[in-house]
Image: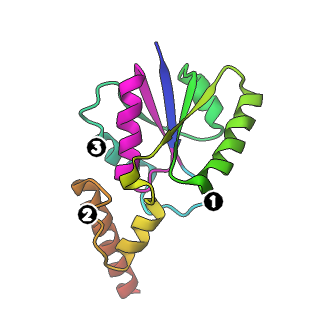
Amino acid sequence: MSVAVYPGSFDPVTLGHYDIIMRTAQVMERVVIGVLNNQAKKPLFSVKERIAMLEDVTAGLSNVEIQYFEGLTIDFARKNQAKVIVRGLRAVTDFEYELQLAQTNRVIAPEIDTMFLTTSLKYSYLSSSMVKEIASLGGDISEFLHPQIARNVLKKYEELTCKEIRL
């Protein structure tokens, strides 16, 4: 069985992420989305919330599953018997970092390859960070996220604003 892992923080999952997930699901028999709690970033959503959002948007993809993981991606790939790590590339600026990561992973785990998918041109500029910034400033994020995810993001910022007002 061909198995791929697609790791990321998915905070929140964007249409660009979904594009990569759908395309991977078309070429792999099983896709495991690994939700990482990146210590370098302060997430807007908890891991549990991010998993729930990913489950919502991938509900129609029978060969996709969502898991939380910590540690090295290659260890996560090995745990899931994956031979491929999927990474999305938006621009040349992503490539240098992703290439270094792929080459390092290949040295540590020569049995696991990295498959790069370029994002669809429509989403080549899109990042979760950009979406969060737009939402935090009251902008329209409907072009970047599934409708339910957009509602979740806006609700989260409303909750955060209410907390700030109460302080």
Q: Residues within 10 Å of mark 2 (few under 14, many from 20)?
A: some
Measure the C-alpha gap from mark 3 to mark 2.
15 Å
What residue is disc 1 on? Answer: 40
Residue 93 picture location, percent across and down? 61, 56
Q: Is 151 one of the magenta-colored residues?
A: no
Q: Locate the C terminus and report the quarter of the image it occupies.
A: bottom left
Q: Element under label 2?
A: loop
Residue found at x 29% / y 30%: 61
Residue found at x 30% / y 38%: 58
Q: Which residues are magenta?
A: 8-36
Q: Residues within 10 Å of mark 1 (few under 14, many from 20)?
A: few
Q: Residue furthest right?
A: 107
- Most foreground residue, 68 or 15: 15
Discs 3/1, front:
3
Labelled disc at residue 57: 3
Measure the C-alpha gap from mark 1 to mark 2.
27 Å
Residue found at x 72% / y 36%: 103
What residue is disc 2 on? Answer: 142
Image position of 19 with respect to 38: above or below: above
Q: Residue furthest top?
A: 1
Q: How is the image coloured?
A: rainbow
Residue 78 picture location, percent across and down? 61, 23
- Most foreground residue, 106 or 57: 106
Please name the amino acid that badge 1 sits on: Ala
Q: Element under label 1?
A: loop
